[in-house]
Amino acid sequence: MAGPINWLRQIAAVTRFGLMSMPQRRGSVAAAAFGIAGVVAVLISVLSIAAGFRRVMTASGAPDAALVLRSGADSEMVSGLMREDTRIIADAPGVARTPEGPLASAELFVIINLPKLSTGSDANVPLRGIERPALKVRDRVRIVEGRMFDWGTNEVIVGLGAAREFAGLRVGDRLTVGRNTWPVVGIFTAGGATAESEIWSDATVLQAAYNRGDSFQSVFVKLKSPEAFTEFKDALTSDPRLEAQVLRQSDYYAEQSTMVTKLVTTLGFLIAFLMAIGAMFGALNTMYSSVSARTREIATLRALGFGTGAVVVSVMLESVVLALAGGTLGAVASYFAFNGFRAATMNWQSFSQVTFALAVTPQLLVQGVVWATLIGVVGGLLPALRAARLPIAAALREL
């Protein structure tokens, strides 16, 4: 036991000397630490976009919620269902029911252009026509300002995210689309789901405004239970009167988030990797400076019996401590700067904007610190090996 204990004491002694000498090298130490902090902050901030987008998409599908589209359609934009189709869907087994009828809402989905409040540039915003059961199908919808629109009128309600992001969507505003004017009478939340990026109106009124006849694009359904999905799906897909595909809403929105999250994650890691190369050189320079400044000290310790292994590990630990300090700084800065920051991006499946809050999750913070640690390990490896190979006699002649 004496051997390992003595070796650990050697590591602790050499590491302590190295850390105590940092104030003498504060310029290079600060440069390396802030470089690593920048890498971590950029990585976390970019990945928080993907995390926030994924969160809002996954919040859009309850376990007992299903979506019906035309067979072969990969989004509502390219789907089409007639009134008779929607009646068959609403009457299918597995659909939850109330005294007022089945909880199935046949819906219309159109895109309108509105200016962003932040830039003034036009963006695609979803305008959705709903039926009366929609508020029970999506049971997390709550009116937080104003009131629900009156059925059979041009009135609309607006998701909270859309109201924050786009111009002309506050209660009392009048939304002009083509030759039609839609008074905004309410703002709603939907538990953080994509519905908060949309504008809602009466489907019948929207059909007339866009000359859609009696057609719809999707049917949103609340099931009796999550287990009823199979029964519901089998009944519709085997019905010869229909050409429909049945999806769990959670699966549908998860698939829609895939393209954006993959793109953002790939770009985030690429940018962070390129920045990490620069930060690594900064750490190398700092640790080489540390070794050079302590040449005589290291040689003296080795002459006194300190092993090369203890010297290597101590220099590596010093580099890792420096990296962890920078990584922690970057992680904390990114959390306070970006967590909850509101943004909007294009959902390439529906070609419409989705508003969401950036999410700096604990997993991202840990990921950032791990990156910082790797930079410290790589940045400290070569200087550590140089310190271990210092010729003792030559270094002592400098005393």
Image (cartoon, rainbow, N blue to C red):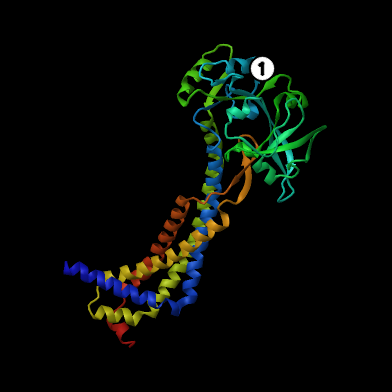
Would you place residue 76 above or below residue 399 in this image? above
In depth, the one of 304 and 62 nearer the eye is 62
Q: Is residue 39 visible?
A: no
Residue 311 on image: x %, y %? 30, 72
Bin the neighbour count of mark 1 within 10 Å (Cα to Cα): few under 14, some 14-19, many 20 and up. Answer: few
Q: Is residue 283 left or right of residue 347?
A: left
Residue 228 on image: x %, y %? 47, 22
Residue 233 on image: x %, y %? 50, 20
In depth, the one of 225 and 327 nearer the eye is 225
Query: To which residue does mark 1 refer?
Result: 83
- Toward which corner of the image does residue 292 lie, by quadrant? bottom left
- Toward which corner of the image does residue 20 lie, by quadrant? bottom left
Q: Quadrant of the C terminus?
A: bottom left
Residue at horizontal 51 percent and vertical 55 percent from the top? 43
Residue at horizontal 44 percent and vertical 60 percent from the top? 372
Q: Is residue 179 visible?
A: yes
Q: At label 1, which amino acid type do we have? A: Arg
Residue farthest to the front, as pictured: 99
Q: Quadrant of the N terminus?
A: bottom left
Q: Secondary structure at mark 1?
A: helix
Residue at horizontal 49 percent and vertical 50 percent from the top? 361
Residue at horizontal 74 percent and vertical 39 percent from the top? 113
Residue 396 on image: x %, y %? 30, 85
Would you place residue 126 above or below residue 269 in this image? above
Residue farthest to the right, as pictured: 179
